[in-house]
Amino acid sequence: MICFVEGEININNSPELRKAFDGLITKGEKKVIVDFSAVSYIDSSGLATLIEMFQRLKQKGGKLRFTNMDQKIRNVFEITKLHKLFEIFDTQEAALNDF
Amino acid sequence: MLISEKLPSRFDAVAQFVTGVIDKLKPLGLSMEELFDVKLCLDEALINAVKHGNKFSPELQIEARIEVSAGILTIEVKDQGEGYDFTKIPNPTEEDNLHRNSGRGVFLIKKHMDKVQHFDCGRIIKMIKFVKTPGLKG
């Protein structure tokens, strides 16, 4: 399953992202790719939501991958060392091949 | 340029204010990267003030002040909460803390600003960033 997130991932819309992800979990999705190519901004609340998504999917035996981040977004993950927690790929193809 | 405002302790008020600040900063000529950094740090400081400082109390306000002079952008955020020991914030990049879903706000501010200071038992955070302001007049 490839999900496209658009705009900002922040404290005000994190609940919406969480709800969408809940839907995927309910459907039993186990391999989820989140494409960041249209994401322009992320704050610590957004990071927290992604961590929660990662943990919930992992509990179900699933895997989460991120792709196509622009450098500014990628920097936020690297500064917080979350690139060690999440699997981040340059392209969807690379993420798919890794599953 | 000076922007100064008092905000209620609500996330929607913060979002509206931050959007307005960034709209006012854009004509000054800051780069996209600088605007991203300023937006992130202002967001994090205000969210902390709402959530941890004022604990969403409708009776407590947040004061935000943004000043831009040639090459220097200063942000000051003040809450009316009980204060906290800002020297005891855990490092979110340590292995044991990576899975935590909180505790990255101040860390992100320190990594995206050139100088960060705390005053009044943590109720005030002051952030300074050296920026390019070719569009700033006077």
Image (spheres, grey):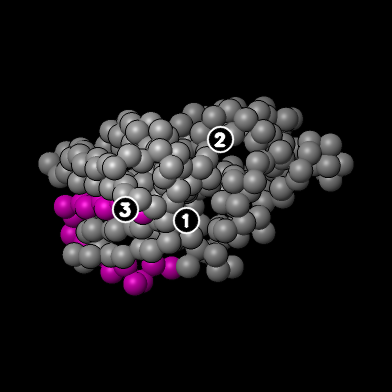
What's under tag 1, amino acid-wise?
Answer: His
Most extreme residue toward the right is: A97
Q: Position of residue B69 (x, y in %)?
A: 31, 49
Both labels 3 and 2 in a single chain: no
Task: Please identify the quarter of the rendering in which residue B60 is found.
Answer: top left
Instruction: Look at mark 1 in the image and give the residue it sits on.
Output: B112
Task: Please identify the quarter of the rendering in which residue B90 is found.
Answer: bottom left
Instruction: Look at mark 2 in the image and give the residue it sits on.
Output: A40
What's under tag 2, amino acid-wise?
Answer: Ser
Both labels 2 and 1 in a single chain: no
Mark 1 or mark 3: whose residue is earlier in sequence: 3
| Tag shown at residue B74 | 3
Query: At 75% from the left edge and 38% from the top edge, which residue is drawn?
Result: A31
Tell whether position B76 is magenta: yes
Q: Are marks 3 and 2 in contact (CB under 8 Å)?
A: no
Q: CA distance from mark 2 to mark 1?
A: 17 Å
Tag 1 secondary structure:
helix
Judged left or right of residue B23, residue A4 is right
Judged left or right of residue A71, residue B40 is left
Tag 3 secondary structure:
strand
Query: At 83% from the left edge and 42% from the top edge, which residue is drawn?
Result: A94
Q: Position of residue A82 (x, y in %)?
A: 61, 56
Q: Position of residue B65 (x, y in %)?
A: 24, 47
Q: Is residue B65 visible?
A: yes
- Image: magenta residue range: B72-90
